[in-house]
Amino acid sequence: MASNKTAMALGSLALGAAFVAPSAPKTGAKTGLRAAKPQAQAQASAGAASTAGAAVCTAALLVSQGRKAGASKTAAIALRAFEQELGVQAPVGYWDPLGLARDGDVEAFQRRRSVELKHGRIAMLATMGYITPEIAGKFPGYLSPSTGLKFADVPNGLAAISKVPAGGWTQILLYMSWCEVSRGAGSDIASGRPGDFGWYVLTSADPEQKKKKLSAELANGRLAMMAIIGMFYQDGLTGSAWGDWANYADSPLRAAAPDFSGELGVTPPLGFFDPLGLSKFDDPEVAAQQFKRRRIIEIQHGRVAMLACLGYIVPEYFRFPGYCSPSENVAFADIPNGLKAAPMVPLIGWAQIVAFVGTIEILNLQQIQSDVLGDYGYGAFGLPYGKKIEDKEKKMKSLNAEINNGRLAMMAIIGMFFQDGLTGSAWGDWANYADSPLRAAAPDFSGELGVTPPLGFFDPLGLSKFDDPEVAAQQFKRRRIIEIQHGRVAMLACIGYIVPEYFRFPGYCSPSENVAFADIPNGLKAAPMVPLIGWAQIVAFVGTIEILNLQQIQSDVLGDYGYGAFGLPYGKKIEDKEKKMKSLNAEINNGRLAMMAIIGMFFQDGLTGSAWGDWANYADSPLRAAAPDFSGELGVTPPLGFFDPLGLSKFDDPEVATQQFKRRRVIEIQHGRVAMLACLGYIVPEYVRFPGYCSPSENVAFADIPNGLKAAPMVPLVGWAQIVGFVGVIEILNLQKIQTDDILGDYGYGAFGIPFGKKIEDKEKKMKSLNAEINNGRLAMMAIIGMFFQDGLTGSAWGDWANYADSPLRAFESELGVQPPVGFWDPVGYTRDGDAETFKRRRETEIKHGRVAMYATMGYIVPEYFKWPGYLSPSMGLKFADVPNGLAAITKVPGNGWAQIVAFAGYYELFVYKFNGTPGDYGWKAISSPDAEVRKRKLSAELANGRLAMMAIIGMFFQDGLTGSAWGDWANYTDSPLRAFEAETGVQPPVGFWDPLGLSASGNLSDFKRRREVELKHGRVAMFATIGYILPEYWRFPGYLSKFLDVKFADVPNGLGAFSKVPALGWLQIVGFAGLVEINIYNEQMNDEPGNYGAGFLGLRSVGIMNTGITDPEVRKKKLNAELANGRLAMMAIIGMFFQDGLTGSAWGDWANYTASPLRAFESELGVQPPVGFWDPVGYTRDGDAETFKRRRETEIKHGRVAMYATMGYIVPEYFKWPGYLSPSMGLKFADVPNGLAAITKVPGNGWAQIVAFAGYYELSVYKFNGTPGDYGWKAISSPDAEVRKRKLNAELANGRLAMMAIIGMFFQDGLTGSAWGDWSLYTDSPLRAFENETGVQPPVGFWDPLGLSASGNTSDFKRRREVELKHGRVCMFATIGYILPEYWRFPGYLSKFLDVKFSDVPNGLGAFSKVPALGWLQIVGFAGLIEINVYNEQVNDEPGNYGAGFLGLRSVGIMNTGITDPELRKKKLNAELANGRLAMMAIIGMFFQDGLTGSAWGDWANYTASPLRAFEGELGVQAPVGFWDPLGLSADGDVATFKRRREVELKHGRISMYACIGYIVPEYFKWPGDLSPKLGISFESVPNGLAALTKVPGQGWAQIVAFLGTYELFINKPVGDEPGNFGKGNLGLGFLGPVTNPEGSRR
């Protein structure tokens, strides 16, 4: 037996040698293989020892061959044997994971391929057999007439097997046998053509075409085999491969499993997660056993993965010294990282690894632990002598953490393996892996057709990857051609969807079938309408095009078949290859969009019945199909209307649908009623409870039962029985029957369901009341859910948060790091389990991360100003000065340096940072203290600074990666990719170059210019469109737009309404004209300049009207920039016009003219008053329902009345209260009841009952609606005169609105300050009073805390902030003095003798930063630290700012020993210091800003001649008292030409405005005599003054005005010289007046 195994092993090696032979042909390989078998059998008798020796020698030879550098790269491998055979396709290539073809037997390979093709064909037919009967229906008639079995009786899927009769199965088997035998078994294999049985559709005379077709069939068959397996699985599992999951209640997926939610490894946020159902067994004991086994395996795998991840990462930075195998002379440094290491490790090394793993597995890891899984009795890290974790809870916690880390590591190692296999490395820079398989065989397609930004070449599936570059290029071209063809078809299909909505061919599609084009619906519905012969013509036409024209792969320009534009044989061809490529690229991109669009249209068409049009028109859409119309039913109210997103009311049977709708509506009413009672039950017990006992026998009083969810366990069992019994009686006797009458929810009872209550007899009123009840019930259901949630979360659903001290949200409120203004913040819920140890661990981790981030932030900033002298690595000759700042430093630090960093961090982590119970406190004096409060304050400050530093370092990393630096001036980053197109056309101030989407990030100039050209065209179209909106308001062409259709220009409405009037031929003319301009005029740019087509003004040069353009490049660029800016405005304007037109029916004119606008619905109703008019921003009235509007208005009036009473009820008790008793029985006087919200707690329960009864009486009996909202016959606000009544009600409504706003403000102020009315000084108990007597509270502001930082009332926090404010103020006062003093005096001598820097050499202000030497900065920082730690270290008498150190802290150094001992005087001094410090903080900010802006923060403005604000101070228009004023900085770039252009525009605008002002004023006193238009009979006298004149001036008058202005602008206003506003035409531009020759006079 052993010898046989050995012989087989040696045979395998011999087979490997045969396949590895460098030049062995296929036939040779096959022969060698077959010869190897008897040879192996002969050698088997030679004995196991000699065979094993030969095998080991052969294996060693092969391994050494694989490891030798420079080994032959031409050697083939066994997997290469069939790479060119049928079915080997990208992206997988040749794939044989089971090694079925490793024997090299060609005949066996072809037999398997043939079988695969057959199986695929059967699977494709089977898949269609599953799907087709679901969609297309079933055959008519009988499957078996003799047995009376119809096709319709046969179910779909596996269930059909039991229905097909025996004779049917016989026919199926005979047919399959005939197909199998008729061609001859294996005839296709014998011919060497698997799957080729001569069927024309799947064969071809061309071998390549035949292989291509069979390969496509093979791929489809593979998909079908996967699909049919899935269908069988789903069918067997759920009873259907195509249906609704909800119907399969007996599916095994619904089974039950034991509860593992508390087991090891079940951690938030996922909890217990078993999507594959691996833990589901019928026997719970087996389930638990299997769960433990899998968990142990998961722990082991996680540990291996964590070690594997370390093994990937560590060797990048550190390797063991010496040899991995001295005998093989293999050093550790010679072994590459990652997967490449496998062949480098010697055989004995693998043996040691396997033996070690086996020992661990067999001796330690085989037993399933019964107590703590994954615990094998070892210490930390599995070290036998390590310290064990004795505490079981802590052990479980550690194992949970280990499981989670292991899960992450398993994901990470899979990613590393994948990246390693893909790129050759799992760690490093992609740019370094030049030999990655992703860069290997495939040619570079980045410059090919269709590769356009922003994606570039995009091939995520690797479809273009082949070992043979020639094959790769061929396949790329084939796919690109297919993409072009698909895009062309999709573009035509999109047009075919859109055009028939507006135009159809006249006549017949099929005269013989009497089918007119007009009879064929648009979209998918057209398919069954087109006759069979029509489909034959379509298929034949497509086939002809495909076979005759589109089969050949072009070798030069893909997609070019020698035709002209649009594929017209006689169309003008594009001869220029570059232009042709550009056009094809544009076509590919448009085709890609069209493919996406047509998919969307198909989807929308299948969903709604149309892919183009108004949803309201598609009444026969399947979304509207089976369900009856419930839009008028009970509960369907605006603004939502009928809302059924889940389709619960959709049934095939309308009667069933109606029945189910009524059932659900009744249930909704019942749930709403219960929810309303539940809401009352939550709120009422906060204010009043029943007296006496809930259960006398149990001695439980009503007062003993807490409110909310806590009441559930307090109610005795018999009480629950009574509740359940009562609900059951109501449900069984009254609520079980679905009403068949008209009104749902009406059980014959009166109001509130009281049997003897007054019923609502009026059906309309009853429906209205039920609708209101449904809406209130819906709100109550939402409210009660919120109350349950708040109750479960905080312990109460009603009350003050401060009272709920036992809420789980309070768990860690007093812990370290909980600081205002956020307080305790845990949005992810990490601490919801209340585990204090876990909280402290996370807090400690946060402090450590913050410390690292603070060091990192300093490490970014400090090297900008100071670097260590000398060498970072003397052995490598690397100086500190050579290491760049930021991320770039990572590549410079040597390996030993990283080892030192890691070792230092590890030392601190393992030995110094010993946790002592207080997070972050490791005994360092600077951030520790014997006083717990002081220590906590220091650590809290450190934590806050660390959080800021973590945010800062992330921002620095991002900025560094983006611009190459995290600290510096943007102007220095000239090589930033954001700089790409800053000088191009269209880059104008104030925005400059703006590309937020990064469309130009690729730096491709051609793409940039193409986009700019498109923007210019869009702008031109938008400018014409804007003019086309405005002009027809004043003038239209005379005559007919279409004489044939009798449509005049005057009949075409303006705006979007014109679409419906323009005839089809008119649209064709528009499209044809646009195409002519695009193809013939806008076809080629001059000098590669976007927007310049050499066609002159408006393109007229192309038709011979104007032959000259702008020849000066600068002037042309200036004009194009102006056009671009105007076009951008026009694009915004036209979008606004479209929106306004769609909203109001017009985009231009007087709002008063648009009486048909839907916004006009209720403009004359009660409550519509100036200045707002009718205002309905939410659109409540868009449905136009007058009854609903009146109901809302009536409700508003009632609310206003209540609010007016409430407002009066707040104000009056401040001045007057009723005498006597509010409740004599309780001894409660009116004078005892406080004002405002505090009164709620004083009013007794009976008082509330009286209030509710009184309000209910008024609502039910007095306020009877009579058709006029708010008019209940009260004389004071009623009148027989309708106008007077309306005026009174309008006044009341306005007052009520004010009162609603007022009462809300009063409630807010009352809740905030304890009173809504009175003198602020009286409310001493307001929380805003907390710190009014503290240091720093001074008039006129008093105590001012707009951010509410002191709202918590925490005195310690307040004093800490005040102390910080004092320190900041002191620093700022010194800084302010440091700005001012050097203007008048400086220290004599040297600042740094060593660097030869004198004090007089240091500039003042921000400029000093660059002059102070590094050691000077160290002295400053050291001095500040000394003051902070030793002088400003502890307050005296807990008084902010008082450190007992005397004036300027000099007492601490013995110069001044006394301070201010009088507390009042000291407070006064500190207050003065605080006020001065506040001024100094504002002053220093202003100085910094002024310094950065002008170069100085102190001095005479006249001295700052270099300021950019000086640029144009001597120019025209700069006059006293303002001088040069440019608050927007439009001239900050210093461009004189731009400045003068703006000044010239300003002069022109000013001249027009002067004329316009005169034109407003003069007609008030004088008008021209005679007629403005004799033809129209319009005199000057009849033209009104002002804007109203616009409607009187005739169209020709406007034409004259525009022509006059255009003539002046184009021909008269030609600038003379370089002086804005001087056009050489004399005063006022009149040529007959002499010009001003004196330049000063002209300027004046």
Image (spheres, grey):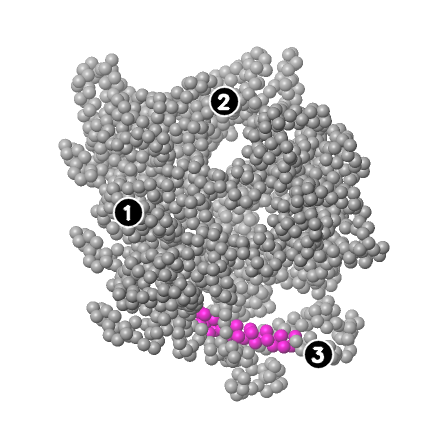
**Which circle marks residue 1562 in the picture?**
3
> What range is drawn magenta here?
1530-1556
- From the viewer's perspective, is the residue at label 3 or at label 2 nearer? 2
- From the viewer's perspective, is the residue at label 2 or at label 1 nearer? 1
Rendered-image quadrant of the C terminus: bottom right
Disc 1 marks a residue whose amino acid type is: Gly
Q: Which residue is mark 2?
A: 256
Tell me: 1449 left or right of 1168. left
Kindly indicate the quadrant of the structure image that contains residue 1361.
bottom left
As drawn, the residue found furthest toward the right would be: 1280
Predominant SS of the magenta segment: helix
Mark 2, secondary structure of its residue = loop
Tell me: 1644 left or right of 689. left
- Name the residue: 22% across, 37% down: 335
- Name the residue: 50% across, 74% down: 1525
* Image spot of residue 143 (x, y percent): 62, 17
- From the viewer's perspective, is the residue at label 3 or at label 1 nearer? 1
* Image spot of residue 1207 (x, y percent): 67, 54
Kindly indicate the quadrant of the structure image that contains residue 1615.
bottom right
Tell me: 92 left or right of 1096. left
Disc 3 marks a residue whose amino acid type is: Val
Would residue 284 be visible to someone looking at this image? yes
Q: Which residue is mark 1?
A: 923
Disc 2 marks a residue whose amino acid type is: Ala
